[in-house]
Amino acid sequence: MERLWKLTEETGKHVLLIGLGLLTMIPIIWMISISLRSEQYVFSGHLVWTGPLHWENYVKALTEVPFFRWLGNSLRIGVIQTLGQVFIGVCAAFAFAYYRFPGRDILFLFVLMTMMIPMQVTLVPTYLIVNQLDALNTLTGVIVPHLASGFAIFLLRQSFISIPRELAEAAAIDGAGAFRLLWTVYIRMSGTILWTLGVIAFLSNFNEFNWPLLVLTDPELMPLPLAFQYFRTETQMDWGATMAIATLSMVPVLILYLVAQRYIVDGFAQSGLKG
Amino acid sequence: MKKPILGYRRKMLLLPLFFLIPALLLYAVFFVYPFLFTFLLSFQQWDMISPERTFVGLENYAVLLDDEVFWKSMRNTLLYLLMTMPISIALGLGLALLMESLMRGRVVYRFLFYLPVVSPIAVIAIVWSLMYDDQRGIVNSLLMLFGIDGPNWLSDTSSSLWAVAIVGIWKGFGYEMLLYVSGLKSIDKGLYEAASIDGAGRWRRLVHIILPLLSPITLFIVIMGIISSFQNFALIKIMTGGGPNNSSNVLVYQLYQEAFQFFSIGKAAAISVILFAIILLITTVQLRLSRSTVHY
């Protein structure tokens, strides 16, 4: 009797969760469904499209606008910015975790503080600086101002201090210099957290909208999140093609999410922070 | 034995500095300097183009306090927070509890509910704009199934902020869910069983054991939630442009308009300073409160 009750309860929970899951997926289903409709059926009011599939929306999205160029820009920004953030984060985190020096705790507090302050507080002067450096409309101007990431430094430092100090000291006695120590002890032992950081940072850099919007006005340089804004105004709301672009923009994110889901979840378990 | 070139003490000072230099330089140029510069600009009048910046004292602040749009943005910023955070936390916590009690299938649900969080915000904003279409958008079509005649979501002053807030909730609750899931995993199962042997029912276990143990996570979610809800720019920019009649304008969007559409840099900087002051105030109050209410 008790088993039957448990089974019923479990089934009930699944029904509820499947319902909520479908509700959550509506925008995604809608996006894909619109991307396959011809213009006159965009507003048919149906969530799922059962008529003929209009793949020409995708042909339009791939040929009428420089989709691959924008994708390339997005990937370049995502990869370079992420590598930079991780590299700078590793160096700073090593200093915070391994060395003892005056002012260390205050500096670390400062790093934490930078995470709490929204980018908008420093937005205008940062824009002016980038302008002054003649870096508007360059990928450098998009990437460099956000290379020092409080999130990266914090996450790596938390991971580094959990590595037993004896390991580092033993290596130091064996004659390892600072770089060897960092490489053979700290980096080698932080594989998971480095991947986690990499994935979370890449997703957030790849999806970033606000800062590139200010820095880049040249359509040739735009990453995807900006570019299809531009597409949208130029073609007078060709919704089928716009949704095709939207769907295509989701693909890289989705692939990474599928492959690296474990790292994202691990990152949460370890840090409880987002990028 | 080779003689060390630098004394040990000096080495222990110089080496960390060496590793910190890239980060410190970047912070100096792209954080500290702009941060201080914002304060300076907020006391000046400037259009970004002319070579002269004139000192006007507190005038920018005075203008803002007299500006109807500013008060609307301020009100909407706080309203948006109140619209999104409680629902998002309740959904996140509810789903986490539900999922953790399952025997199988957790991974699939976790994947589904977290998908909105990793989706590009610009894509989400475009898709929802179409969903909100008055005539045949899917939102009103679905409401019609229940006999509800939905509003013209994005172009009605009474619904535009809600429309954006719903997207904010949709995009964010998976994040709260994942945090609560990791929190629930760390709760000692023994505590749970002891309470159940003592005869505590589900509801009492939830209220007296689980929720108190999750309170550090809730505090963290509240603080991060406030900060991220104040940064709600992309949705406003793409979906409503702050309109109609500023009914969905928020501080960060007004800041953008003042700086990059109206070129009143001083006024934009003053909004930045006010934004900073609000966040400082809220986080300080939160942390004070947490000392007495959070149970570890």
Image: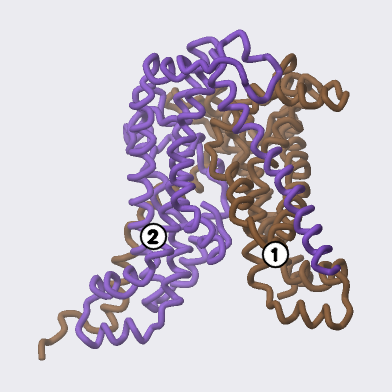
Chain colours: A purple, B brown
Residue B55 horizontal/vertical position (percent): 54, 34
Side (left or right) of A200 relative to B201:
left
Q: Judge whether B202 appears above or below B126 on screen.
A: below
Considering the numbered disc 2 on the image, is that residue within a helix, a strand or a loop?
helix
Do residues under tags 1 and 2 come within 8 Å of each other at their CB atoms?
Answer: no
Amino acid type at mark 2: Gly
Pointer 2 local density, CA inside 10 Å: few below 14, some 14–19, many at least 20: many
Amino acid on which disc 1 is placed:
Leu
Residue A1 pos. (x, y %): 86, 68
In the image, what residue occupies the spot 52% across and 65% down?
A109
Given the image, what chain letter belongs to the residue carrying mark 2?
A: A
- Label 1, label 2: how many angstroms apart (C-alpha)? 27 Å
Of the residues tagged 1 and 2, which is closer to the observer?
2
Q: Quadrant of residue B145?
A: top right
Q: Residue at x 78, y 67 (%)?
A: B211
Q: Which label sits on residue B174? A: none
Q: Closer to the camera, B229 or A70?
A: A70
* Circle 2 residue: A89
Find the residue positioned furthest to the left: B1
- Whether residue A187 is visible: yes
A147 to the left or right of B275: left
1 and 2 marks on the same chain: no
Judged from the image, the secondary structure of the residue bearing numbered disc 1 is: helix
The quadrant the C terminus of chain B occupies is bottom right
**Residue at mark 1:** B287
Image vertical order of residue B39 relative to residue B159, above or below: below
Along the line of sight, the residue nearer the viewer: B129 or A211: B129
Instruction: Locate the N terminus of chain B and report the quarter of the image it occupies.
Output: bottom left
Residue visible at 50% across and 17% down in the picture:
A241
